[in-house]
C-alpha cells in the first residue's frame, strides 16, 4: 500500500515538473496557416499569429458559400480585407464586412476613390494604394498589389434613382501576402495568364498560389496549369473562381489533369473545409 502511495506521489511530481518545464508555446493549430475557401475567390486565411485575412468576399448570394459564412459574425475578427477589383463577385459583401469589423477595405486605389466619392464607406475605411508598393496593414502581415490581366468597373445602385450606375473601378490587381512566418500567398484575382507572372514567381517565390480556372472571364484549367508550371512555380496551388457561374465551366478535375505529374502540390478546396499549411 505504502509503495502504491509512493508511486502515485512520484507520478504527480513528474507530471508537475513536466508541466512547469513545458514552454507556453502556442498550440499547433494556432501556429500554422489555415485557409478556408468560401467559393469563387473568397478565402478566410488564418495566420500563424492568429490574424484573419479575408479576400474577395462574395458570400450572401454566392451559391458555393457555406450557409454558416452568410452570417458575418462567424468570422469573429477580420484584420485584413482584400478586394482584387470592382466586379460584384469580388466586392459584393466587402463594404458590409468593413463596417461590421471596422477594418479598412484594401482594393485598387482608384476603386477606393470611387467608393469614397459614392459614399459607400467612410474615407478612413478606404485607404489608397496601388501596384508595386508593399504595405503592412497590421504588424507582421505584408501586402503587395501586383498586376492582373482583367478589367474593373463598379456597379452602384443609386438610392435616389433606384437605378444601377456604372463607375470606374480602377485597375484590377492580384495580391501577394506575406504572413508573420514568411509564408507567401499569391492571390491572382481575376486574370488571364501574362508574362509578368514569371516576375511574380521569381520576385516573391510564393509558397501557395490561388489561381482562377473557370475560363470565359479568366484563365481556364489548361491556361492556369501552364501559368502555374511555367511562370509562377509555387510550392502549392489551389484552383478558385469556378463552379459559381454557368459561363465559367472549368473544373478542378480538368485543372488537376492539366497539372499532370508536376511536383507542385495541387489542393482542391471544398468550401468551408479548413486546409492547413
Ligand atoms: Zn470574377
Image: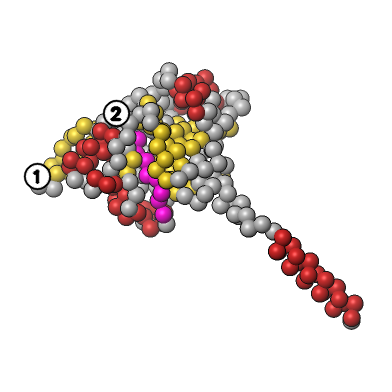
Q: Over which residues does the magenta segment extend? A: 77-86
The residue beneath circle 2 is: 171
Picture residue at 63% right of the left edge, 58% below the top: 24
Mark found first going from the N terminus, 1 or 2:
1
Kindly state the secondary structure of the residue where label 2 is placed.
loop
Name the residue located 40 percent from the left edge and 45 percent from the top edge. Answer: 80
Disc 1 from disc 2: Cα separation: 27 Å
Mark 1 Cβ and ligand 1 under 8 Å apart:
no
Query: Horizontal and vertical percent for residue 33?
Result: 54, 45
State whether residue 222 appears in this view.
no
Of tags 1 and 2, which is closer to the observer?
A: 2
Report the residue marked by disc 1. Answer: 161
Q: Residue at x 74, y 68 (%)?
A: 16
In the rendered view, tell whether residue 175 sits above or below residue 261.
Answer: below
Compare residues 193 and 169 and report the one nearer the observer. Answer: 169
* Disc assigned to residue 239: none
- Snapshot quadrant of residue 181: top right
- Residue placed at 57% from the left, 31% from the top? 235
Check the picture and name the quadrant holding the N terminus.
Answer: bottom right
Pointer 1 local density, CA inside 10 Å: few below 14, some 14–19, many at least 20: few
Instruction: Considering the whole magenta stretch, tell me its main secondary structure.
Output: loop
Amino acid at each position: 500500500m505504502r509503495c502504491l502511495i509512493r508511486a502515485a506521489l512520484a507520478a504527480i511530481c513528474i507530471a508537475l515538473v513536466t508541466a512547469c518545464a513545458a514552454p507556453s508555446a502556442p498550440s499547433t493549430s494556432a501556429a500554422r496557416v489555415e485557409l478556408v475557401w468560401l467559393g469563387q475567390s473568397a478565402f478566410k486565411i488564418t495566420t500563424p499569429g492568429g490574424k484573419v485575412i479575408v479576400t474577395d468576399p462574395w458570400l450572401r448570394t454566392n451559391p458555393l458559400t457555406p450557409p454558416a459564412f452568410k452570417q458575418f459574425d462567424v468570422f469573429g475578427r477580420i484584420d485584413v480585407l482584400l478586394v482584387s477589383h470592382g466586379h460584384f463577385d469580388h466586392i459584393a459583401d466587402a463594404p458590409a464586412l468593413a463596417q461590421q469589423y471596422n477594418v479598412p477595405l484594401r482594393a485598387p486605389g482608384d476603386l477606393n476613390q470611387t467608393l469614397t466619392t459614392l459614399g459607400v464607406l467612410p474615407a478612413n475605411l478606404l485607404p489608397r494604394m496601388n501596384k508595386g508598393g508593399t504595405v503592412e496593414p497590421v504588424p507582421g502581415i505584408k501586402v503587395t498589389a501586383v498586376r492582373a490581366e482583367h478589367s474593373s468597373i463598379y456597379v452602384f445602385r443609386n438610392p435616389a434613382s433606384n437605378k444601377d450606375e456604372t463607375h470606374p473601378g480602377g485597375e484590377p490587381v492580384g495580391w501577394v501576402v506575406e504572413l508573420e512566418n514568411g509564408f507567401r500567398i499569391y492571390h491572382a484575382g481575376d486574370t488571364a495568364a501574362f508574362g509578368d507572372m514569371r516576375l511574380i514567381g521569381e520576385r516573391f517565390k510564393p509558397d501557395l498560389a490561388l489561381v482562377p480556372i473557370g475560363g470565359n472571364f479568366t484563365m481556364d484549367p489548361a491556361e492556369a496549369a501552364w501559368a502555374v508550371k511555367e511562370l509562377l512555380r509555387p510550392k502549392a496551388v489551389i484552383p478558385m473562381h469556378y463552379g459559381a457561374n454557368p459561363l465559367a465551366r472549368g473544373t478542378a478535375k480538368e485543372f488537376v489533369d492539366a497539372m499532370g505529374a508536376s511536383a507542385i502540390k495541387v489542393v482542391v478546396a471544398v468550401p468551408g473545409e479548413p486546409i492547413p499549411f
